[in-house]
Image (tube, helix red, strand yellow):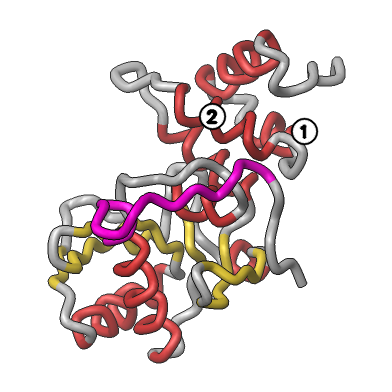
Amino acid sequence: MRTRAHGYPRVVPEPGTSFEQLTESMKRAAAALRDAGVPFLLGGGLALWAHGAPPSTHDIDFYILREDAERAAAALAEAGMRIEQPPEDWLVKAYDGDVLIDLIFEPTSGPVTREVIERGHELEVLALRLRVARPEDVIVAKLCALTEHEPDFSRLLEVARALREQVDWDEVRARTGESPFGRAFFVIAEGLGIVAEGRPG
């Protein structure tokens, strides 16, 4: 069982910042899902931070099974959060005050399955033990989500530099090989010396 990964120094901003609000909401939502018996993974930027990447201040992502979406939303509503059903058919949104929580059951990398959840790493995150998505799964999802209108590699390159010794880059390369953004990422990351050059064939 993994308890803590090495990588980027975990510098937590001072209390009162948006990052503290984000992590407090993460803990409340995780506890609500756990108490309701909903299987989940912490995903997105906070998952990468839990593995040792720089802090994320965007939003909170949880990966859940599609069949658990209604039960997960009810658990967060019971905890006092506002639920929103967006037009997209791959997530449910919740708000803890101003903090956005995405309950994602089908990211761009493919549907969340029991296998995806079970292969997550159990970590202690701010004194709360919970299952966290593997860095490979989060990075693949983020690369697959890039579009020509938002081809921003800066955060992913920052994460890659921080977690480069932890990530199976051959797996990420194989899973994103059909994406032009996946291929472009490796050209940049290899050129910067962040990731070793892939083996031919």
Q: Is 57 rendered above or below residue 63?
A: above
Q: Amino acid at mark 1?
A: Asp
* Callout 1: SS: helix
Report crowding for label 2: few under 14, some 14 to 19, many 20 or more residues within 10 A (C-alpha): some
Count of numbered circles in the view: 2
Does residue 114 show up?
no
Q: Which mark is residue 155?
A: none
Identify which residue is drawn at 33% across, 73% down: 69
The image quadrant where one finds the C terminus is top right
* Callout 2: SS: helix
Residue 101: give x, y in percent of width and height.
28, 61
- Residue under pointer 2: 158
Hey, which quadrant is residue 80 in on the image?
bottom left
Does residue 71 show up?
yes
Identify which residue is drawn at 23% across, 51% down: 88
Identify which residue is drawn at 39% across, 77% down: 68
The span picked out in magenta is 7-21
Identify which residue is drawn at 66% across, 39% down: 163
In magenta stretch: residue 15: yes
Left or right: residue 198 versus residue 173 is: right
- Residue under pointer 1: 170
Q: Is 14 rendered above or below residue 54?
A: below
Q: Main secondary structure of the magenta part?
A: loop
The image quadrant where one finds the N terminus is bottom right
Residue nearest the viewer, comparing 113 with 21: 21
* For the residues bearing labels 1 and 2, Cβ distance under 8 angstroms: no
Question: Which numbered disc flags the more N-terminal residue, 1 or 2?
Answer: 2
Q: Is 199 rendered above or below residue 141?
A: above
Residue nearest the viewer, comparing 90 with 73: 73
Residue 139: give x, y in percent of width and height.
56, 40
In magenta stretch: residue 64: no
Badge nearest the viewer, 1 or 2: 2
